[in-house]
Image (cartoon, helix red, strand yellow):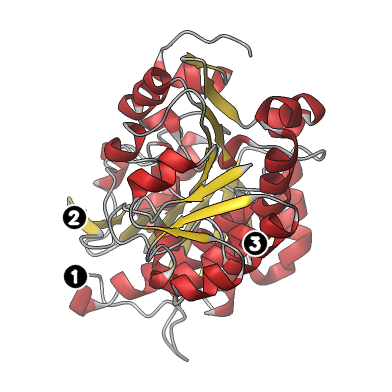
Amino acid sequence: MRVGIPKEIKNHEYRVGLTPSAVAELTAAGHEVVMETGAGTGIDFTDEDYTAAGATVARDAAEVFGRSDMIVKVKEPQPDEIARLEPRHTLFTYLHLAADKPQAEGLMKSGATCIAYETVTSRRGALPLLLPMSEVAGRMSVQVGAHYLEKGQGGRGVLLGGVPGVAPARVAILGGGVSGLNAAQMAVGLRADVTIYDISNERLAELDTYFGNQIKTAYASRAAIAAAVSRAHLVIGAVLVPGAAAPKLVTRDMLRTMKRGSVLVDIAIDQGGCFETSHATTHEDPVFEVDGVIHYCVANMPGAVARTSTFALNNATLPFVLRLANMGAADAMEADEHLANGLNVSGGKIRHPAVAEALDLPYEAA
């Protein structure tokens, strides 16, 4: 199979779909890899690194799409990239269609087979290709939250961990999944006062056992969230409903109870965000203020630590890329129901029920 790696063109996105070592695995298996010149320069991989691994360097994205059967990316395709997709293509990348109807309609029009990293499942019911970026985003959320709590950034002027004689900042983490767990690890490491909210009592028990007396846990009722928001200096939105739009857990009315200079970090912004006042931002202009509260809603958070993120993502995606290349998309998905769960669009139809419901579009099983 001919596998293409275009350069990412989303704002301040430096990750790359495949590293040279991943390319070497594909070429050793007999596949052809075509990468756009400069695709890896954002994380210090040169064209020569890729040619040494067996790839062919193309002059531009048009050539990559024109010569490839499968396109491997990181972020959702931008309009120019969607326009280059054809029915013969398999697209393998993050899509997050539940919050992006124009993208979904563009992919439907293309006729391409579009498999989303974020809805591929595992035997345990986990999301193995979302997990590494959820880990990164969770850890980053505390890092950026602490930064924007600084007075010079417009924040309240609170040190996350406090000092002897001065209480630490209160951190409320909404969602106890992978992102929430990793956010809590970082916040605990910085000695913040941390509470995790979730609607699964089983998960809360697991987190309680994991962290012991380092954190508090609470059931995520509306009243509990409202109380948490009014007290917190930093609120991290880490909820996930696979393939679907994120629930709006923090309303505008709740926001008005927060202290001026408090910070919201919305990890769920790729799925529409879990704060009513959220809208997607970029690394170039990452924050905005509503009612005196700073919102950080960057839709590709892990892109800020692109080298770490690329290696982590490739570790997870490479086995699936090899399977798709070796067998072709149709046979690979027929042989693996968990990979098949990643199918979001094909043949001009929405193939994932949660995506269809979120976008109010017809669903049709493959």
Residue picked out by circle 1: 154
Mark 3 or 2, which is nearer the eye?
3
Comparing 314 with 85, the one in front is 85
C-alpha separation, residue under disc 1 versus residue under disc 2: 9 Å
Q: Residue at x 18, y 55 (%)?
A: 289
Residue 15 visible here? yes
Viewer-nearest residue: 38 or 142? 38
Image quarter of the N terminus:
top right
What residue did someone put label 2 on? Answer: 289
Query: Quadrant of residue 70 in the image?
Result: top right
Apparent side of residue 101 relative to residue 1 in the rendered image (left or right): left
Q: Is residue 76 visible?
A: no
- Say left or right for 272 vs 79: right
| Amino acid type of the residue that numbered disc 2 sits on in the rendered structure | Glu
Question: Which residue is pictured at 45% across the width and 62% down the height?
Answer: 15
In the rendered image of this protein, does residue 305 appear above or below residue 58? Answer: below
- Residue matched to label 3: 22
